[in-house]
Image (tube, rainbow, N blue to C red):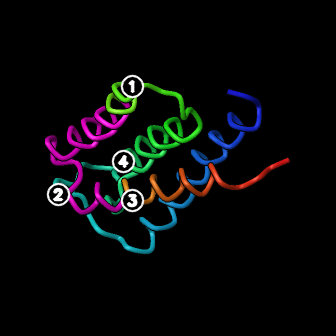
Amino acid sequence: MNDEKITKLIMGLLFIQVCVKILKRIIKQNRPIQPKNSDYGMPSTRAASMFFIAVYLILVNPRLENKTKYLLMIFAISSSYMKYHLQEHSFIQLFIGGCIGIMAAFFFYNISLF
């Protein structure tokens, strides 16, 4: 990957962190099991970040083999599923987080920095 693609990857991850923190404070939806000293659960930061990374890497590397693309998506899905299985997020919190990550990946892939 060249410098612009790496810069956009880092900017995208920072954008997701800020965007999700703001949305959590606006929506104020609790997690299924609310641990002490925990923030709100909607949307899931983990799902947003993992789906952003997976989709962005697929977009910037069009020559990836299909099995590599599938593995990236399985990584994002299984990472999100673990949060669901541990009851740290509901399905809708993970789904919305994943959608944010996917939209951010397309946005940062298509913007021009230099």
Which labelled disc corresponds to residue 32?
2
Q: Quadrant of residue 43?
A: bottom left
**Residue 21 locus on image (x, y percent):** 49, 59
The amino acid type found where label 3 is placed reads Cys
Q: Which mark is first along the chain, 2 or 3?
A: 2
**Residue 14 locus on image (x, y percent):** 61, 47
Q: Secondary structure at mark 3?
A: helix
Which residue does the image show at 16% across and 41% down from the upper left? 86
Quadrant in the picture for the N terminus: top right
Q: Which mark is first along the chain, 4 or 2?
A: 2
Q: Is residue 39 visible?
A: no
Asked if labels 4 and 3 touch by Cβ distance under 8 angstroms, the answer is no
Q: Quadrant of residue 29?
A: bottom left
The alpha-carbon separation of the residues under discs 3 and 4 comes to 9 Å
The amino acid type found where label 1 is placed reads Thr
Which labelled disc corresponds to residue 99?
3
The alpha-carbon separation of the residues under discs 3 and 2 comes to 20 Å
Q: Which residue carries the number 1 mark? A: 68
Which labelled disc corresponds to residue 5?
none
